[in-house]
Image: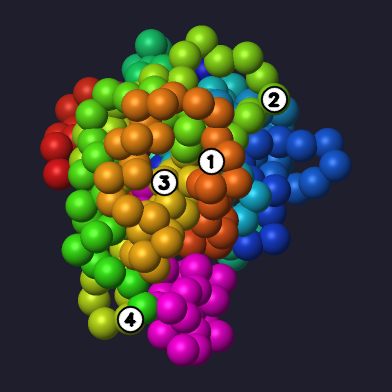
Amino acid sequence: MKRKYKATIAYDGTGYSGWQFQTNAVGIQQLVEDALAQIDGAPVRVFGSSRTDAGVHSRGFVGHFTLNVPIPPRNLVRAVNARLPDAVRFMRASYAAADFDARLSAKGKEYRYQLYQADICPPHLAPYWAFCHRPLDLGAMREAAAHFVGRHDFVSFAANPNRELESTVRNVFSFDVRKTGHRYVFIVRGDGFLYKQVRSMVGFLVSVGKGVERPGAVKELLDAAKPRTARVETAPSRGLFLWKVFYRNDTIAS
């Protein structure tokens, strides 16, 4: 009897082309599907909660799939992890309802962006923390981040995905900027995000922090709703983590 599963997947995106399967590069999806196929004895398709860009990491990516030969979730986690590279791990798995869809059932996502500000970035942090040597104005970045909260057309803060979109309007529930020592963490929650939207928003906040842009410029760009220009920089992929995907019984308020 076939069984449907939900799995939470963490991965170090360094050196990978993102989640999505690609013919000319190695994506996380390919690694997970290959591991599951070894267990099930047949090809397995994993449907993900979203796409992540090359070099982006995950702490809480969610996927769903069906196995022909059911295996208890705890045993499945062990079996899959034994067949995955160290950079990819099933953190947990469970049986899923027939109508569960990792992407369509999601009601929101949280991304976190990590930035290290100092004269030198310690090498062990480099794969997971973007680096900025210039001092940053935390208050100005927080003021600017507040303008992102709400329902807006985010076309000015997204890249062209080379596919048609129904809408570029998204709802950002919260956007917080935290600082501990040399470490800045940008935490954003929303109902969904456009291609490179989070990295574009963070890139612009860093420009605000450097004094290159004013906090109010965020509202001006949102109100203008024009395609992104070079004025909006894209923050490096290595600092970005898909932190959590929210479903029906999760509390999404920060």
Image mark for residue 196: 1
Q: Amino acid at mark 1?
A: Lys
Tell me the element at label 3: helix
- For label 4, the residue is 182
Mark 3 surroundings: few (<14), some (14-19) or many (≥20) residues within 10 A: many
CA separation in Å, label 1 and label 2: 12 Å
Mark 4 or mark 2, earlier in chain: 2
Query: In the image, what residue occupies the spot 55% across and 85% down?
Result: 123
Q: Looking at the image, which is closer to me, 125 or 221? A: 221
Q: CA distance from mark 2 to mark 3?
A: 20 Å
Q: Earlier in the sequence, mark 4 or mark 3?
A: 4
Residue type at the position of mark 3: Met
Gap in angstroms between the C-alphas marked 4 and 1 = 25 Å
Sequence-wise, the earlier of marks 1 and 3 is: 1
The stretch of residues the image draws in magenta is 106-134
**Numbered label attached to residue 201:** 3
Which three-letter amino acid code belongs to the residue tagged 2? Asn
Which residue does the numbered mark 2 point to in the structure image? 162
Of callouts 4 and 1, the N-terminal one: 4
| Vertical placement of residue 193 versus 210, above or below | above
Q: Is residue 9 rendered to the left or right of residue 162?
A: left
Q: CA distance from mark 4 to mark 3?
A: 20 Å
User: Which element is circle 4 on?
Assistant: loop
In what quadrant of the picture does the C terminus appear?
top left
Residue 216 — which label?
none
SS assignment at label 2: loop
